[in-house]
Every structure is written in structure tokens, then in C-alpha cells.
Image: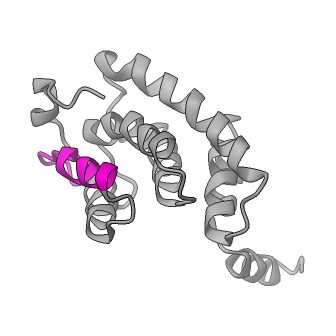
């Protein structure tokens, strides 16, 4: 991951203002459970369905974090799935050409990592995040949206629809 690329400094995040996620991402590489760093990424890279180029640039770094860290953290999977879901919305900026190859390669790797972790995952939030990645990668955005919800949220939705 090349954090020295000057283009990082001019990227925008979910609020459509300058957003440099590198410090938070670097913090997570040395402290994968750093709560404040995760909060910063969640808050800055996504806002009410809006994302920016910094969001796209962060996905390969999130995948690298998963590869480096054997912990079963749901954050990188869920955040990457959310970014990809938002990427498809016409109101969000297109994926810049200079990020395209790395972003797509990261998604291929993330899908493989999610499949590998599914076998022994037991935490509901992690399972939901892994399933959202699988559904997103397979081009099923509505299934991904449902997957990310908790079991009780899905049950409530089905109850309200008269299906449970």
C-alpha cells in the first residue's frame, strides 16, 4: 500500500470535503482494534449514502488490514461492502481511473478472504459482514443490504410484512 502517493491528500470523503484516511488506516495496521480509528473511518468515508474518492482509495488498505490481521474483525468487511454499495449510486463520484485496478483487485481478494473466514465465523456481526461481502461481490446489492442487518432486525422486517 503506497500511502506516499500525493493524490491521497486531495481526496474527499463522505462529507464531500477533504478527507485523508491514511493516519487512521496506519493506526489500524499497528493496533487493529483501535476503536477511535474505526470510528473515524466509518464517520469520514461514508455519510448518509455519500462517499468520495478517499472511500475508494481505502478499500485496498482495508483488504491489506484483513490479510495482516488474523483477528476476526467485522469492520473492514462491512465498511468495504458499504463503500461498494454506495459506489453504484449515481450521486456518488465514479471510481477514478488511477484507483480502478487496485480497487477491483482488492475486491477479488476480499471476496476470497470472506469465503475463507465464513467456515469458522461464529460472531453474528462478523457473519453478517462476510455475507454482505459475498452478496455484494456476486452483484446482489439487496441481499447485501439484508445480510448486514442483525437477525432481530430481519425478523422485525418479516413480522411487519406478515412473513414470519
Left or right, 65 with respect to 96, comes to right
Q: Is residue 117 left or right of residue 70?
A: right
Measuring 49% from the left and 45% from the top, which residue is drawn there? 66
Q: Say if the magenta span includes residue 18.
A: yes
Task: Point out residue 137 in the picture as x, y percentages from the top left corner.
Answer: 64, 36
Residue located 66% across and 62% down the image: 128
- In the rendered image, the quadrant that contains the C terminus is bottom right
In the depicted structure, whether residue 45 falls above or below residue 157: above
Does 14 lie within the magenta span? yes
Identify the residue at image location x=70%, y=52%.
Answer: 131
Q: Quadrant of the N terminus?
A: top left
Q: Position of residue 57 (x, y in %)?
A: 31, 34
Q: Give the magenta part as a residue range.
A: 13-30
| Image location (x, y in percent) of residue 74 | 54, 60
From this viewpoint, is residue 135 visible? Answer: no
* Image-based side of 151 in relation to 102, left or right: right
Coordinates of residue 111 in the picture (x, y in percent)? 63, 36
Q: Residue at x 81, y 83 (%)?
A: 159
What is the total number of numbered labels drawn onto the structure image? 0
133 and 94: which one is in front?
A: 133
**Which quadrant of the view contains residue 32?**
bottom left
Asked if residue 20 shows in the view, the reply is yes
Q: Quadrant of residue 153?
A: bottom right
Front-most of residues 14 and 38 = 38
Amino acid at each position: 500500500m503506497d500511502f506516499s502517493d500525493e493524490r491521497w491528500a486531495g481526496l474527499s470523503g463522505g462529507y464531500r470535503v477533504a478527507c485523508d484516511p491514511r493516519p487512521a488506516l496506519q493506526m489500524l495496521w499497528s493496533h487493529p482494534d483501535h476503536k477511535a480509528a474505526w470510528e473515524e473511518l466509518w464517520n469520514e468515508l461514508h455519510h448518509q449514502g455519500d462517499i468520495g474518492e478517499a472511500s475508494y482509495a481505502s478499500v485496498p488498505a482495508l483488504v491489506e488490514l484483513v490479510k495482516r490481521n488474523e483477528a476476526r474483525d467485522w469492520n473492514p468487511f462491512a465498511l468495504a461492502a458499504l463503500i461498494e454499495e454506495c459506489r453504484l449510486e449515481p450521486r456518488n463520484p465514479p471510481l477514478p481511473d488511477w484507483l480502478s485496478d487496485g480497487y477491483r483487485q482488492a475486491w477479488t481478494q476480499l471476496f476470497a478472504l470472506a469465503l475463507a473466514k465464513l467456515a469458522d465465523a461464529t460472531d453474528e456481526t462478523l457473519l453478517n459482514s462476510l455475507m454482505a461481502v459475498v452478496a455484494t461481490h456476486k452483484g446482489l446489492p439487496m441481499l447485501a443490504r439484508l445480510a448486514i442487518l442483525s437477525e432481530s432486525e430481519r425478523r422485525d422486517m418479516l413480522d411487519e410484512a406478515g412473513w414470519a
